[in-house]
């Protein structure tokens, strides 16, 4: 029976979680991962970076890391993936074991379990497999960059570098029993509202307030059911949110410029596009309906871009079958879920790599109260080990 060294696996997570690694600044994390794997006997020739960062809007220090480990027996290539970046609140994390969980000693920071626990699980699985001498089919590890700012690493993955994949498993957030087999699609919008400036005390009637235009548009959208949870019989279901508003410099000026950022989500691409259309129409109408004393109105610049398309794996997908077997092998009961959030798996699917996503025991992610449940993390390591082992044995 294959097994993992729990103490070493926990320390591996502590080491990785302590490394700062904002989106675009993942080089140090990648360097440590490479060192861990080469120390375990992975040939340096197995490592290759792609050029995803050259296509990202922020650039970044480094692209995705692809590790191709040749098989000792024939069989389908199994890919395991995780993302290496963390959100800003995790910079300064001081991970330490606190009973049955891990948290940051620095109370003002997050832990970084999202997704250093996924990275550590992948490394642990390979280290333990190589140490055991167990036969295995080819293995590919994919460590993605820039997940937290829009899935850019997975989005701009160089498919040729990744090569052929037979079945794929992504390790990120959620519980270890849950197999995320599909996810929602999302679209981001930037809305620039141009008003007409005027002195707010002397001649406000000469101005057109960009704030009022934005407020009127948002009010109409809310009243008509196109913000928040959206359920339109015969049309579709989705969500929309205006999350960021910036504008104005002084109280004595009729505001000439406001910029808003919004999003729309739906499992139905046509419904998502309808939501985007409704937002654009509301802002354009609000701008046209508000005029100054000369009959002039403001105007709208509206930009929308797809963050990720929805996907859903078929019930008999080989990765689902193998994933459920791996969860059972560690003594848990698997269940399937479709996510309302975006995952690297959204873009992996678009690249022709259907992937099931597992959680690693992360809780309260993106907050200063983030925790890693040790028992769940260790089972995620065992699940990863089961997936890359050719024996299909139970994992201790």
Image (cartoon, grey):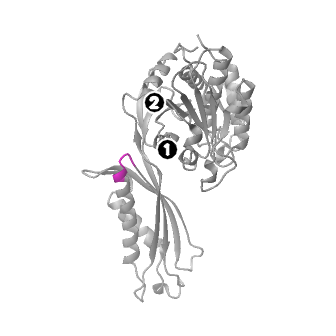
The correct choice, above or below, for 72 with respect to 168 in the image is above
Task: Name the quadrant containing residue 252.
Answer: bottom right
Q: Secondary structure at mark 2?
A: strand
The answer to whether residue 116 is visible is no
In the image, is 283 to the left or to the right of 394? left
The correct choice, above or below, for 242 with respect to 192 in the image is above
**Looking at the rendered structure, which numbered label has been put on residue 109?**
none
Q: Count the marks: how many?
A: 2
In the image, is 19 to the left or to the right of 150? right
Q: Residues within 10 Å of mark 1 (few under 14, many from 20)?
A: many
- The residue indicated by pointer 1 is 347
Residue at figure coordinates x 62%, y 46% from the top left: 87
Nearest to the observer: residue 343 or residue 13: 343
Can residue 268 be found in the magenta stretch? Answer: yes
Look at the image and give the residue range highlighted in magenta: 266-271
Residue at figure coordinates x 39%, y 62% from the top left: 279
In the image, is 132 to the left or to the right of 390? right
Q: Position of residue 202 (x, y in %)?
A: 53, 88
- The residue indicated by pointer 2 is 179
Q: Which image quarter is the N terminus in? A: top right
Lower position in the chain sequence, tag 1 or tag 2: 2
Residue at figure coordinates x 59%, y 24% from the top left: 381
Q: Position of residue 19 (x, y in %)?
A: 72, 39
Residue extending farthest top: 1
Can residue 85 be found in the magenta stretch? Answer: no
Nearest to the observer: residue 93 or residue 136: 136
Q: Are marks 1 and 2 in contact (CB under 8 Å)?
A: no
The correct choice, above or below, for 83 with respect to 287 in the image is above
Residue extending farthest left: 234
Q: Which image quarter is the C terminus in? A: top right
Nearest to the observer: residue 371 or residue 133: 133
Q: Secondary structure at mark 1?
A: helix
């Amino acid at each position: 029976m294959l097994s993992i060294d729990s103490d070493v696996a926990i320390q591996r997570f502590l080491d990785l979680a302590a490394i700062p690694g904002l989106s675009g600044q993942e080089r140090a994390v990648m360097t440590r991962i490479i060192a861990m794997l080469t120390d375990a006997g992975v040939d340096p020739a197995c490592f290759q970076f792609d050029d995803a960062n050259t296509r990202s809007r922020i650039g970044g220090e480094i692209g995705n890391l692809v590790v191709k480990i040749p098989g000792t027996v024939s069989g389908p290539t199994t890919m395991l993936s995780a993302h290496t970046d963390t959100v800003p609140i995790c910079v300064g994390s001081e991970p330490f074991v606190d009973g049955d969980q891990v948290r940051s000693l620095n109370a003002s920071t997050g832990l970084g379990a999202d997704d250093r626990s996924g990275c550590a699980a992948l490394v642990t699985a390979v280290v333990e497999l190589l140490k055991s001498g167990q036969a295995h089919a080819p293995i590919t590890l994919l460590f993605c960059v820039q997940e937290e700012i829009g899935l850019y690493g997975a989005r701009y993955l160089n498919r040729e570098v990744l090569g052929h994949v037979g079945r794929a498993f992504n390790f990120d957030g959620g519980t270890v029993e849950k197999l995320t087999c599909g996810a929602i699609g999302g679209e981001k919008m930037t809305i620039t509202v141009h008003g007409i400036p005027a002195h707010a005390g002397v001649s406000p009637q000469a101005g057109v307030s960009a704030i009022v235009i934005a407020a009127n548009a948002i009010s109409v959208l809310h009243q008509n059911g196109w913000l928040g949870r959206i359920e339109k019989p015969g049309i579709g279901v989705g969500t929309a949110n205006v999350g960021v508003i910036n504008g104005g410099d002084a109280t004595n000026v009729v505001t000439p410029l406001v910029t808003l950022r919004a999003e729309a989500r739906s499992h139905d691409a046509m419904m998502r596009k309808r939501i985007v259309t409704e937002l654009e129409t509301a802002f354009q109408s609000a701008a046209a309906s508000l005029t100054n004393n000369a009959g002039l109105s403001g105007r709208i610049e509206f930009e929308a871009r797809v963050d990720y398309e929805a996907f859903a794996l078929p019930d008999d997908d080989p990765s689902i079958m193998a994933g459920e077997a791996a969860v059972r092998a560690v003594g848990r009961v698997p269940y399937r879920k479709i996510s309302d959030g975006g995952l690297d798996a959204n873009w992996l699917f678009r690249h022709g790599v259907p992937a099931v996503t597992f959680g690693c025991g992360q809780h309260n992610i993106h907050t200063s109260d983030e925790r890693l449940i040790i028992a769940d993390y260790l089972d995620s390591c065992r699940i990863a080990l089961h997936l890359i082992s050719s024996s299909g044995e139970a994992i201790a």
